[in-house]
Image (cartoon, rainbow, N blue to C red):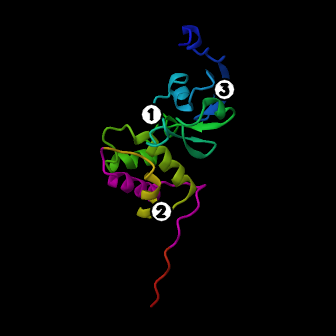
């Protein structure tokens, strides 16, 4: 058996990570092995990013990094150096009305326990920022990467389809126009 002192690995020196979170500059001091999810929660107090499986399977920790939806449990905080990060807290400030996607989730009962909701909201935000005119199959395909044990997904799908129609986004591509029917 090894002596006890050889079983304990020394901690790495912490590093400073500078990035932009929800439009604001941020600096975090983290160990190199700290996930972005843990750093957002522990260093910046942004607890809307939920940590569940820690293997990238459930989607609860989804955030946007440089415009892409990513699993924050799989990304090290040091890998986000210089990045633009948006968390669920960045969709609407506490003193503002809900973001249209958040409102659609409320209106369509797309949440129950709420644990998966932040990740689903961030995935829906990214999807609806990129394209419009979605059909139910497309939405189901995108949300299939999220685990929700409460809702059965229909409310989630309905909410995303509603937000697709209701969210006015001047920078988003226009929804496809249905073909005109002939006489």
Q: Name the residue carrying label 1.
A: 50
Q: Secondary structure at mark 2?
A: loop
Q: Quadrant of residue 82?
A: top right
| x and y percentages locating residue 171 in the rendered image | 61, 55
Q: Name the residue carrying label 2.
A: 134
Instruction: Farthest residue to the front: give it.
Output: 1
Q: Residues within 10 Å of mark 1 (few under 14, many from 20)?
A: many
| x and y percentages locating residue 122 in the rendered image | 49, 44
* Cβ atoms at labels 2 and 3 below 8 Å apart: no
Give the magenta-colored segment's residue range. 150-177
Q: Name the residue carrying label 3.
A: 17
Q: Secondary structure at mark 1?
A: loop
- Which residue sits at x=64%, y=38%? 84
Q: Earlier in the sequence, mark 2 or mark 3?
A: 3
Q: Nearer the viewer, residue 121 or 60?
A: 60
Q: Residues within 10 Å of mark 2 (few under 14, many from 20)?
A: some
- Which residue sits at x=50%, y=28%? 46
Q: Earlier in the sequence, mark 1 or mark 2?
A: 1
Q: Nearer the viewer, mark 1 or mark 2?
A: 1
Q: Earlier in the sequence, mark 1 or mark 3?
A: 3
Is 147 rendered above or below residue 42?
below
Q: Nearer the viewer, mark 2 or mark 3?
A: 3
In the shown orientation, is residue 170 left or right of residue 54? Answer: right
| x and y percentages locating residue 127 in the rendered image | 52, 53
């Amino acid at each position: 058996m090894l002596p006890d002192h050889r079983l304990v690995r020394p901690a790495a020196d912490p590093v400073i990570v500078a990035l932009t979170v929800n439009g604001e500059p941020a600096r975090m001091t983290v160990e190199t092995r700290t996930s972005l999810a843990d750093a957002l929660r522990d260093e910046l107090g942004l607890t809307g990013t939920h940590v569940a499986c820690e293997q990238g399977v459930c989607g609860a920790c989804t955030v946007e990094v440089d415009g892409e939806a990513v699993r924050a449990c799989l990304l090290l905080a040091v890998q986000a150096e210089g990045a633009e990060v948006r968390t669920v807290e960045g969709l609407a400030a506490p003193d503002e009305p809900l973001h249209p996607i958040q409102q659609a989730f409320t209106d369509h009962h797309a949440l129950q326990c709420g644990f998966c909701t932040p990740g689903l909201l961030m995935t829906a935000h990214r999807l609806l920022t990129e394209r419009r005119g979605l059909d139910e199959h497309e939405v189901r395909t995108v949300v299939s990467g999220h685990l929700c044990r409460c809702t059965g997904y229909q409310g989630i799908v309905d909410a995303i389809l509603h937000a697709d129609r209701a969210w006015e986004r001047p920078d988003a591509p226009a929804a496809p126009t249905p073909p005109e029917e002939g006489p």
